[in-house]
Amino acid sequence: DGGSVVFPPVLVQMLDRLESEILADRVSEESRRWLASCGLTVEQMQNQMDPVYTPARKIHLYHCDHRGLPLALVSTEGATEWCAEYDEWGNLLNEENPHQLQQLIRLPGQQYDEESGLYY
């Protein structure tokens, strides 16, 4: 049967509760006793858990001209991390993008379509 192990539902429920308690940093006395009866500590159990994935996020503020065209993306620290120049019709003349940021917005309501290479 592929060697899969099926845990009893009561054990699965208990382990799910224990994981929630550990993640919330509020392990109950009952859970501590149960772990101790298994010869484990909360710290050992924590080390066996998969780390919680938190994607890195970075906020950029838009600096736009009177038409709403993005001229720069500025970090919360005040550093310009992307900037561009456009002609009168909104066509890109020059772009500086040293951090390879994806800036998909053009004129108000327009967004870059990767498949066609156009802004709609």
Image: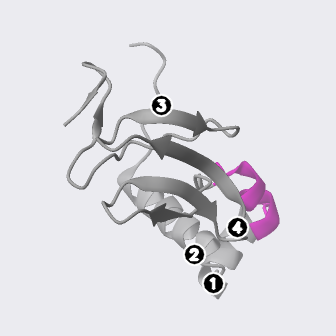
Q: Quadrant of residue 115?
A: top left
The reply to whether dot 2 and dot 3 touch (C-beta < 8 Å) is: no
Q: Which residues are magenta?
A: 39-51
Q: Residues within 10 Å of mark 1 (few under 14, many from 20)?
A: few
Disc 4 to disc 3, C-alpha distance: 21 Å
47 or 8: nearer the eye? 47
Amino acid marked by disc 3: Val
Amino acid marked by disc 4: Leu
The number of discs equals 4
Is 40 colored magenta in this rendering?
Answer: yes
Marks 1 and 4, the one that precedes in the sequence: 1
The reply to whether dot 2 and dot 1 touch (C-beta < 8 Å) is: yes
Disc 4 to disc 2, C-alpha distance: 13 Å
Which residue carries the number 4 mark?
Answer: 35
Is 46 colored magenta in this rendering?
Answer: yes
Marks 4 and 2, the one that precedes in the sequence: 2
Disc 1 to disc 4, C-alpha distance: 14 Å
Marks 4 and 3, the one that precedes in the sequence: 3
Amino acid marked by disc 1: Arg
Residue 63, given in percent of the width and then of the height, sits at: 49, 64
Residue 110, given in percent of the width and then of the height, sits at: 23, 45
Q: Height in image: 25 above or below 87?
A: below
Q: Residues within 10 Å of mark 2 (few under 14, many from 20)?
A: some
Which residue carries the number 2 mark?
Answer: 21
Left or right, 73 with reference to 65: right
Residue 31, given in percent of the width and then of the height, sits at: 62, 76
Q: Name the residue furthest front.
A: 88
Marks 2 and 3, the one that precedes in the sequence: 3
Which residue carries the number 1 mark?
Answer: 26
Q: Height in image: 3 above or below 84?
A: above
> Can residue 41 be seen from the camera position used here?
no
